[in-house]
Image (tube, rainbow, N blue to C red):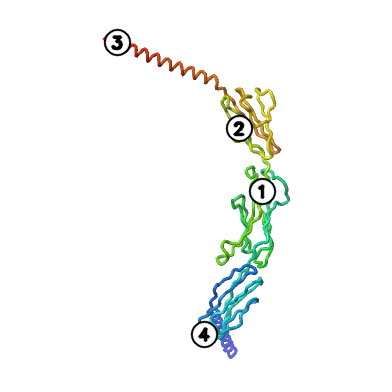
Amino acid sequence: MLQYFFGLVYLSAVLLYVALTGTHAAECPLQLNPQRVVVEYGGSVSVNCSTSVTHQGIGWEASEGAVPKSRDNLITWRVSNLREWDIQPYCYLNYNGQCQLELPVTIYKTPDSVFISTVNHNGPMMEGNQYELQCDVLNVAPVQYLIVKWYKGQTLVDQTNFTDTTITPVNKTVTLLIRPNGTDDGVQYRCEAELELGAEGPRPPPKLTSKPLSVEVYYKPQHSSSTETVSKSNEVTLNCTVKANPAPTYTWDSEHLKEKITSSVLPSSKLSPGKYTCIATNSRGRDSKVFIVKSTGRTTFWAIVLTGVAVAVLLIISYVIYKCYSSRNSII
């Protein structure tokens, strides 16, 4: 029974101690201004710690810029050249015991360089094949705030965030898979490293962009239409020009052609009514287009003749009616 009584006494004492110390810790009457610090590596920092209560001493503990205990109500932690990555400053107060308030500090460093390249590939890319682009971000911190963004021209196509909690500078490599087509020939890719450090961080967020990587794509010719009908005239030409890489060669096939034509355009002087087939070819493939030339000369001639005849007939009829009307009036 006595052992049970002493046990209750001990448990009550422990609970009372926890309650008192917990209350003091939770109600530590200190204010920090600002409440969080984001500073570039090697930069300066200044934070005020203040209290409104009567106390026995207030001070700062830190691996850089520690401030001795003071009886003032406001003291400042100040470092002009912050180079301690794992610094954990806190302000303490002797007030019915001692309580403390930690200052969250984020030290950042922008990358030394951001570089974009292709992985295991040199030279032109082939339409429809898959390729890998790589972005290397060197010497950046802290990586958990890093965002690597991929741009195709001015369009954002992908981005990568990190969960690594390392606070000292590291290198990061990110890759992007692409499958280019003919419209991507000559397009520029770039990657961008951005540090999004929150509301207390710099605005706009610090970032560094790679030099652009121009992509050359080999793709076959592809006409917008497979057949085109034109009317024969003195000005008409047949234009078979089509985009392709490498540049295509052209051949023409028609029963009306007596010589080999390698130009992409057939002038009117070489045209007669009929069918002309143009074939554009490069190392990636070929595509053909058929031109149908129709004669318009005779049709135009007869249209003019018939129009003239119709006008003449109308004039004659009008004249006859006029004469008949005039004769009748004269008799009356």
Q: Secondary structure at mark 1?
A: strand
The amino acid type found where label 4 is placed reads Thr
Residue 227 is marked as: none
Specify whether residue 311 is in view.
yes
Residue denoted by label 3: 328
Mark sitting earlier along the chain (3/2): 2
Mark sitting earlier along the chain (2/4): 4
Mark sitting earlier along the chain (1/2): 1
Mark sitting earlier along the chain (3/1): 1
Asked whether 329 or 173 is in front, the reply is 329
Q: Secondary structure at mark 4?
A: loop
Residue 2 percent location from the top left of the image: 58, 91
Measure how far apart labels 4 and 1 are at the Cα level.
68 Å
Tell me how many marks there are.
4
- Position above or below: 230 against 325: below
Marks 2 and 3: in contact by CB < 8 Å? no
Residue denoted by label 1: 214
Mark sitting earlier along the chain (4/3): 4
Q: Give the position of the N terminus as an image quadrant.
A: bottom right
Q: Is residue 23 left or right of residue 214?
A: left
Of badges 2 and 4, the one in the foreground is: 4
- Position above or below: 301 against 248: above
Measure how far apart labels 3 and 2 are at the Cα level.
68 Å
- Position above or below: 113 against 225: below
Residue in the image at 65% along x and 45% along y? 186
The amino acid type found where label 1 is placed reads Ser
Residue denoted by label 4: 54
Decide: few, some or many residues near mark 4? Use Cα within 10 Å; few <14, some 14-19, many ≥20.
few
Decide: few, some or many residues near mark 2? Use Cα within 10 Å; few <14, some 14-19, many ≥20.
few
Marks 2 and 1: in contact by CB < 8 Å? no
Measure how far apart labels 1 and 2 are at the Cα level.
31 Å
